[in-house]
Image: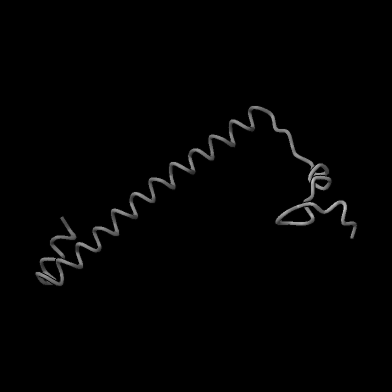
């Protein structure tokens, strides 16, 4: 191995010389817009799912508390409301 060409800190094989050899594709503006739109949609869906999961977790915790404190029937009514 030639020590002069390995200057990468974390990955010694990604020195500047090797990085310069990487081919980077250039996409049309239309494709870039489609990719960005898909990414934004995915980010929005992930945020919505995260919010919903937090709500469900809180509901489950509260239902467990009601079950312990007031019994099964009350907990079921609480869950159904």
> Please, which residue is most extreme toward the right here?
2
Colouring rule applied to residues = one colour
- Measured as percent of width and height from the top left, residue 35 is found at 59, 37
> Is residue 30 rendered to the left or right of residue 66?
right
Residue 79, by quadrant, is bottom left
> Is residue 77 rendered to the left or right of residue 58?
left
Residue 81, by quadrant, is bottom left
> Please, which residue is most extreme toward the top here?
29
> Quadrant where the N terminus lies?
bottom right
Using the image as rendered, state which of residue 73 and residue 48 is in the foreground. Answer: 48
- Measured as percent of width and height from the top left, residue 60 is found at 25, 62
Q: Residue at x 82, y 48 (%)?
A: 18
> Is residue 42 rendered to the left or right of residue 47?
right
Residue 36, by quadrant, is top right
Q: How many marks?
A: 0
Using the image as rendered, state which of residue 36 and residue 77 is in the foreground. Answer: 36
> Is residue 79 rendered to the left or right of residue 27?
left
In the depicted structure, whether residue 80 falls above or below residue 20: below
- Measured as percent of width and height from the top left, residue 4 is found at 88, 52
Q: Residue at x 29, y 59 (%)?
A: 57
In the depicted structure, whether residue 26 falls above or below residue 16: above
Q: Residue at x 23, y 58 (%)?
A: 59
In the depicted structure, whether residue 6 falls above or below residue 17: below
- Measured as percent of width and height from the top left, residue 23 is found at 79, 41
């Amino acid at each position: 191995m030639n020590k002069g060409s390995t200057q990468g800190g974390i990955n010694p094989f990604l020195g500047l010389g090797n990085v310069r050899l990487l081919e980077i594709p250039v996409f049309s503006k239309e494709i870039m817009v489609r990719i960005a739109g898909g990414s934004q949609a995915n980010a929005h869906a992930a945020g919505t799912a995260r919010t919903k999961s937090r709500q469900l977790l809180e509901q489950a915790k509260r239902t467990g508390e009601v079950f312990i404190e007031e019994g099964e029937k009350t907990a079921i009514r609480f869950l159904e409301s």
